[in-house]
């Protein structure tokens, strides 16, 4: 952990950008019932029933020093999807970097 914090503390160098990457599956849902309106002394309430609308995958790039982020949404999470994200990171977002 200390090595990571030391990396974040280094001066920014456009040839060696620090990029955080994460991916996560996400379930898409829609509500079946309308929310119960707020009443005096009570908050608006939601029912727990929902309809499953499928899934997707989120790929997230984040550069903490530059305040830059990019999110890609894909239908699935495969090796090819991951490889395409890495290719975009190198060829599209940081084409002049020596090391990411």
Image: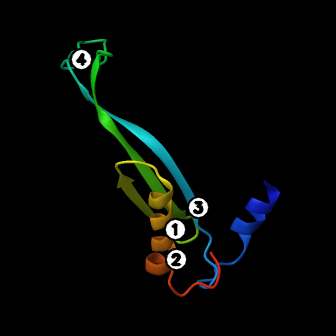
- Point out the tag, 1 or 4, that comes first from the N-terminus: 4
Instruction: Locate residue 20, reporting x and y percent.
Output: 59, 61
Residue on which the image places disc 1: 86
Q: Count the labels in the image.
A: 4
Local secondary structure at mark 1: helix
Residue on which the image places disc 4: 38
Local secondary structure at mark 4: loop
48 or 78: nearer the viewer: 78
Q: Compared to 80, does 31 lie above or below?
A: above
45 or 39: nearer the viewer: 45
Residue on which the image places disc 3: 20
Q: In the current view of this chain or complex, which residue is farthest to the bottom? A: 96
Q: Which of the two discs, 2 and 4, sits closer to the camera?
A: 2
Q: Quick one: label 2, few (<14), some, or many (20+) residues within 10 Å?
A: some
- Point out the tag, 2 or 4, that comes first from the N-terminus: 4
Question: Which residue is painted at 52% across and 68% down in the image?
Answer: 86
Q: In the current view of this chain or complex, which residue is farthest to the right? A: 2
- Point out the tag, 3 or 2, that comes first from the N-terminus: 3
47 or 91: nearer the viewer: 91
């Amino acid at each position: 952990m200390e090595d990571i914090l030391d990396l974040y503390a280094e001066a920014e160098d456009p040839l060696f950008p620090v990029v955080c990457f994460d991916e996560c599956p996400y379930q898409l849902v829609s509500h079946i019932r309308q929310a119960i309106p707020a009443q005096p002394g009570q908050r608006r309430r939601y029912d727990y029933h929902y309809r499953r609308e499928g899934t997707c995958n989120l790929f997230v790039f984040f550069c903490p020093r530059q305040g830059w982020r990019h999110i890609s949404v894909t239908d699935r999470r495969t090796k090819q999807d991951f490889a395409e994200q890495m290719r975009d990171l190198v060829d599209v977002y940081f084409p002049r970097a020596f090391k990411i």
